[in-house]
Amino acid sequence: MAQSDPPGELLVILRHAPHGSSWLREGLDAALVAAAFGQSVTLLFQGEGVMALLEGQDSGALGQKGTSATLEMLGMYDIESLYVDAAALARFGLTRDDLLLAAEPLEAADTPAILAAHPQVLVF
């Protein structure tokens, strides 16, 4: 975490892929609701959650909505602090250029600092 970043009130950790469950969508919804009520929200995409940031997310095999429309709304809710698990990017062969939104890669060693900077943490 950069020294100039002010701590947010709420950290939402998104660990699930865009399709196959409702965890990712529920996490994004929780973040949007918190932001709508004036909380400062930071998102951390970990593990398979980084797949949500890939461009071209369509609906899932079971007709689940894609997440790209929700992700594109984050700026309207002033959710601009986005982090992505650097190890997960590497594991899936991705770079920052593959992502729909600009997210700061976060090394595992820096995760405790992000957690400590947020008094509220939700994990989806």
Image (spheres, grey):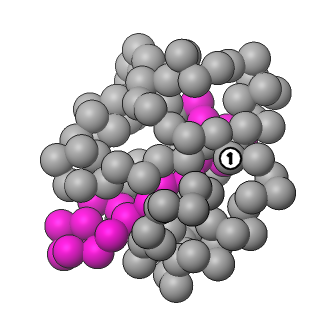
Is residue 17 placed above or below 6 in the rendered structure? Answer: above
**Tag 1, which secondary structure?**
strand
Q: Kindly identify the residue that appears in the image at 61 percent across and 57 percent down.
A: 1
Residue lying furthest bottom in this view? 119
Q: Which residues are magenta?
A: 31-51
Q: Is residue 92 visible?
A: yes
Is residue 102 placed above or below 45 in the rendered structure? Answer: above
Taking the magenta stretch, the answer to whether it contains residue 100 is: no
> Which image quadrant for residue 20?
top right
Taking the magenta stretch, the answer to whether it contains residue 43 is: yes
Q: Is residue 62 visible?
A: no
Residue 24 in picture, x, y percent from top left = 49, 49
Residue lying furthest front in this view? 4
Residue identified by numbered label 1: 106
Q: Amino acid at mark 1?
A: Leu
Residue 75 in picture, x, y percent from top left = 24, 45
Q: Kindly identify the residue that appears in the image at 63 percent across and 66 percent down.
A: 114
Counting other residues with Cα less than 10 Å from the Cα at mark 1, is it few (<14), some (14-19), or many (20 or more)? many
Residue 102 in picture, x, y percent from top left = 44, 32
